[in-house]
Image (cartoon, coloured by chain):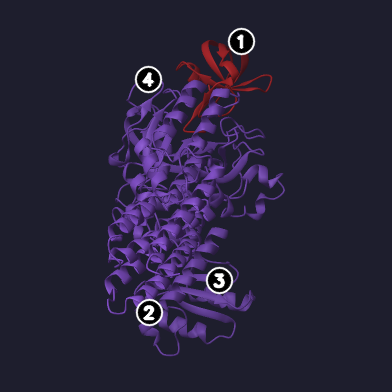
Chain colours: A purple, B red
Amino acid sequence: MPTLNRGLAISACVCALAGCGRRTVDRSLQAELADEGVVPGLIDVQLRGSEAAPRQFVRTLGEVLEDEELRDQSLEGLFERDVAEHFLIKVDPAKAAQVLAALRARDDVLYAEPAVRMAALWTPNDPDYAKQWHLKAAGAEEAWNATRGAGVTVAVIDTGVALVDDLDKARIVTGHNFVANSADARDDHGHGTHVAGTIAQSTGNGVGVAGMAPAAKVMPLKVLSAEGFGTSAAIADAIRYAADHGAKVMNLSLGGGARSAAMADAVAYARRRGSLVVCAAGNSGSRGVSFPAAYPGAFAVSAVGPKGTLAPYSSFGPEVRIAAPGGDKSLGEESGVLQQTLAEGDATKSAYRWFQGTSMATPHVAGAAALVASMGVTNPAAIERLLVSTAKSPPPEARGQGPMAERYGAGLLDAGAAVKKAAIWHGLLRLILALGGAFFAIAHARKLQQLRAKESLPGAFWTALVVGAGALTIVAPLGLARIPGAAYVLTPLAGLGALIVGGAHANVAGSVLALVGYSAVVPFTLATFTRAATSRSTALGTWTPLVAGLSFGWAGLLLGAALLRTVYLPWIPSLLVPVWLVIGAVIAWGAGRGLLARGGVR
Amino acid sequence: MKVQGKVEHKDLEGGIWQLVADSGQRYTLASAPPDLKKCAGERVEIDGAVEEGGGFGFAMSGSILKVRSFKKL
């Protein structure tokens, strides 16, 4: 049970950080049991081996809980690592201290400690969230503390989206109906609403169920009739519409067996415009990925069930890039994917329904892509790389079915790992580069101070330091996602203008602002003005170190973006984007250096 | 075209209706009349047309067969 293993590992880390591991030296057992987060009567026991005697002993102490019992008690995150060696036992809370003492007295017990809730992970309060095994399997919980997908729009190209009560209407942006050619993109089947729910169901609202990226926006584009059929022309038009109207991610839980040049062109166009096109591999249960998933530029998703093995209905083939939970109802109704949608046979009512299909796997990936994009990774190739490089290995049972890569692509989706990699690895590198910028600022500011000993500039010095260090390249810190408007805080200043008007590919203004932001225009212009303003005086002026610091910071930002290739820029071929950024970095650095050089600093 | 086979309701994508032709070919049924949906598990002959290129939809399982009429066998 890899998921459970990971849950325990995280739990162990949380415990270690919180100092709630074995504490027999300086704290009494009673105090330990009174710790915040301790679940009364639950004890975590790890044996040194898998000998029969200690196992038997543990079983005499209390009830060994099963996973299902854990869920019933809302204790997600407290799992058995290995039934043979690790136990979660339920004992009489009044006797917990006695049981702990007895266990710790044994040599064959590695440790015994009160079970602690995984307080570090945010768990939604939606009452049926516990039934959504698929969100946990996709790594949503680990991702949510860092981001909920704010600032990203996901186009749902499907049967439309109904405004059911567990979808935040404020997050449904204007869409289009390509079947009736109207602005009314409401769902008259339920498929599109179910898919939209997996992406952005209202989460943490105490109602119904959760979604992968609840803070993302959904753009409903109706291309399928109430029966679920559509034309390649309508689908191609919708892809282009989404690319032109700011959809960073597209979800296509649809397909067919026929090649369509128009659709292939539309997918390529969307990719050039900076959108990630996530498509269902198909439900043939055999080799052969459907279109548009099989087109170059599409991100094809196969489906797995709760065990992490390929669902029997899922298509597979060399085009599959990743696998995600799509449900497997051959294992029972609740092994499907649960979201709110229209009631069966009555489009006027809503219901929570279990669906299965590669259509259900696809929005898990689209939602994960939105989460990654909201961390500032706007280049679709970079989003793909993050999702693929962090995918989990399929379980051992998956072996022997045939080529693994054709069934699972890079592996099973792990949104939490992808978001963490985006946040930590990318953020760290960005910070290092920003500190490099700050180094220039500090070095020059110190020289400035030496030169101008009689006129120290503490205010300007610190401003230069702060600006150079991080104001331009803010690292997305974990935990900020809960703050309204965090997307604006987490976005580097260079990308802020574009974000305010809806994204780099939302409209011309957004495109221009993105290009200006990710160039040396701002520092160069400021440096030019500063030089002009101070040219009549030998004094450098208070603004000089500030602008120089800003220029160095901006140079660090552009260099970081060039190295990481995380940024999408409109109108520039993707291969030339790093060149554009490096040129900008050189100009920005030169602008800052030039300002200070005027003061005799070399 | 006329196709003979068995009608199936598959619990996929919220529920789809299919015809498994005697040839083994699988069709997803479009415009299936309510009476046809009462024939799950039964053999029928469907008079209909296959969408050009197989058609597109969320079923993604076999070509789309638009039903004009049907009769039980």
- Residue for badge 4: A181
Of the two numbered discs 4 and 2 on the same chain, state the one appearing first in sequence.
2
| Quarter occupied by the N terminus of chain A | bottom right
Q: Which mark is residue B2?
A: 1
Residue A498 found in image quarter:
top left
Q: Can the viewer see residue B59 in this picture?
A: no
Q: What's the chain of the residue with tag 4? A: A
Mark 4 and mark 1 in contact (Cβ < 8 Å)?
A: no
Same chain for the residues at labels 2 and 3, yes or no?
Answer: yes
Callouts 3 and 1 close, C-beta under 8 Å = no
Q: Report the Cα–Cα distance between label 2 and label 3.
A: 20 Å
Q: Amino acid at mark 4?
A: Asn
Q: CA distance from mark 1 to mark 4?
A: 33 Å
Q: Residues within 10 Å of mark 4 (few under 14, many from 20)?
A: few
How far apart are the alpha carbons under marks 3 and 1? 62 Å
- Rendered location of residue A272, percent (x, y): 51, 36
- Nearer the observer: mark 1 or 4; the answer is 4
Picture layout, residue A170 above or below residue A545:
above
Label 1 secondary element = strand
Q: Are marks 4 and 2 on the same chain?
A: yes
Query: Quadrant where the C terminus of chain A lies?
Result: bottom left
Which residue is at 37% across, 20% downward? A181
- N-terminal of the pair, mark 2 or mark 3, is 2
Q: Chain of mark 3?
A: A
What amino acid is found at the position of numbered circle 1 in the picture?
Lys
Residue A547, horizontal then vertical, whole percent: 34, 61
Q: Is residue A473 left or right of residue B22?
A: left
Residue at 38% over, 40% down: A512
Q: Which residue is mark 3?
A: A86
